[in-house]
Amino acid sequence: MLSDKTVGRLSLYRRLLAKLQSQKIHHVFSHELAAIARSTPAQVRRDLMLIAFTGSPAKGYNVENLIDHIDGVLDAPEGQNIAIVGIGNLGRAIIAYFSGRRPKLTITAAFDKDPEKIGNLIHGCRTYSIDQMISVIHEKNIHIVILAVPADEAQFVAAKLVEAGIKGILNFAPVPLRVTPDVFVEDIDVTTLLEKTAYFARNGKTSFSKE
Amino acid sequence: MLSDKTVGRLSLYRRLLAKLQSQKIHHVFSHELAAIARSTPAQVRRDLMLIAFTGSPAKGYNVENLIDHIDGVLDAPEGQNIAIVGIGNLGRAIIAYFSGRRPKLTITAAFDKDPEKIGNLIHGCRTYSIDQMISVIHEKNIHIVILAVPADEAQFVAAKLVEAGIKGILNFAPVPLRVTPDVFVEDIDVTTLLEKTAYFARNGKTSFSKE
DNA sequence: TGGTGTGAATCGATTCACAGCC
DNA sequence: GGCTGTGAATCGATTCACACCA
């Protein structure tokens, strides 16, 4: 299985390669891809080696083929449906941002506890009551959820999601979720990330210095 | 200098300790803190060792003292002002979220290019034109910026921020920023994180399994 | 010559394991 | 007995360095 870090970089490479493709660039060397991805040539070559993609010393890597190859690794051929819970500013921002961005990942349902919001369409995505969550998740064959609710509701919702058979949670709530071990949780803890930024800005850690 | 990972965990510990404090819990053992932080006892003890905080075998760590000690490591005593660029749904969500949350980190200015938004107050934070950015950043002594603009504007704004002498950027734009090496950049790449969640949800990586 | 693919070396972070203490 | 503090061992990720190729 690929490591967390490698999967993250592959996702980034794919996005940068799509940009190159739109500029009619058809081949790229590891040092070129590394430069735009803020990585190193050796890292790029290692990552591509791990997914068994090969280039040629003469022309480097073929952009189209590499995109297709990464698609083959990262995407489910049949696509994956996603739900989002919590339709505040953050939830709306996320729906707007993802609408139409990744063809194989579609946000197909939104949930909120506010009765005012039930039935609303946001970028074509319908809002349901949290009470309907488990049945809608089953109906729509959803296995991944974006959790964008306040901290004090996160664990309650997470428990329901586990009950509904969810396999992955992208968690924006600043709370370490307790879930069964078969569920993958990716935390986005904005407070911590801001505190880290403040700490390193103040203590002069640069993107390059090692100490 | 503390590592990135350690700083992140200290920020999390502090938040969890504040919760314990509000529950009138005054001492905590490394295995207890580890359990609520989803970490390990050895990791907790190592992190606290790195900031030279000591506990006692009999009672564990004193919650109040540890919070104060982490404050001393992470916070600037005089506080740090923060600006945010880009007042869409995401920008508003972030301002609302941080308003009053960390006393030593205050969002004191917002910037947007939309003339409609200039002058608005959002949770007490005034919106300025991007044209005024450099001078306002100097006036308000801001060294940290949250970047929440669309991908195609991010590099342009980042260049201006570097020019303004910013030392840290929390970057929500899905673009690897090119900045001078004295600037610390923390990326929050939601697309990549969602793709990672989808990949591991599909391939059955659990929070515990190692393979 | 200047790139790829990759075993080996290195580096950093985590975990083990145990001495010392209450 | 069960905890802390920490040197040593381990593990995982990155980087080096070089054989091989066009």
Image (cartoon, coloured by chain):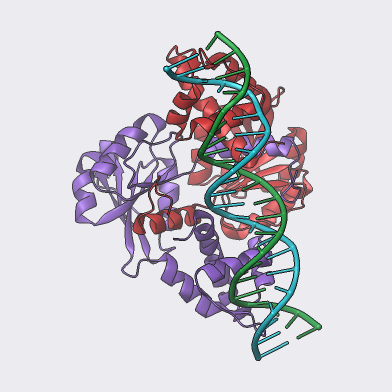
Chain colours: A purple, B red, C green, D cyan
At which x and y percent is residue B211?
Answer: 42, 54
Residue at the image point whose x is 34% and y is 43% from the top: A181
Residue drawn at 37 percent across, 29 percent down: A152
**In which quadrant of the rendered image does the N terminus of chain B lie?**
top right
* Residue B151 in view: yes
- When asked about the image quadrant of residue C21, the answer is top right
Against A68, is A151 above or below? Answer: above
Q: Is residue B188 left or right of residue B167?
A: left
Q: Nearer the viewer, residue A156 or B164?
A: A156
- Relative image position of residue B106 (x, y in whole percent): 62, 29
Residue A34: x and y, percent?
A: 66, 66
User: In this rendering, does residue B122 appear at all?
Assistant: no
Q: Is residue A18 left or right of residue B210?
A: right
Task: Examine the rendered structure and indicate whether residue B124 appears above or below residue B160.
Answer: above
Front residue of this view, candidates B99 and B105? B105
Q: Residue at x 49, y 54 (%)?
A: A4
> What residue is rendered at 71% in x and 22% in y?
B77
Q: Is residue B126 above or below residue A22?
A: above
Viewer-proximal residue, A166 or B150?
A166
User: Residue B74, image x and y in percent?
Assistant: 65, 29
Count the numbered circles shown: 0
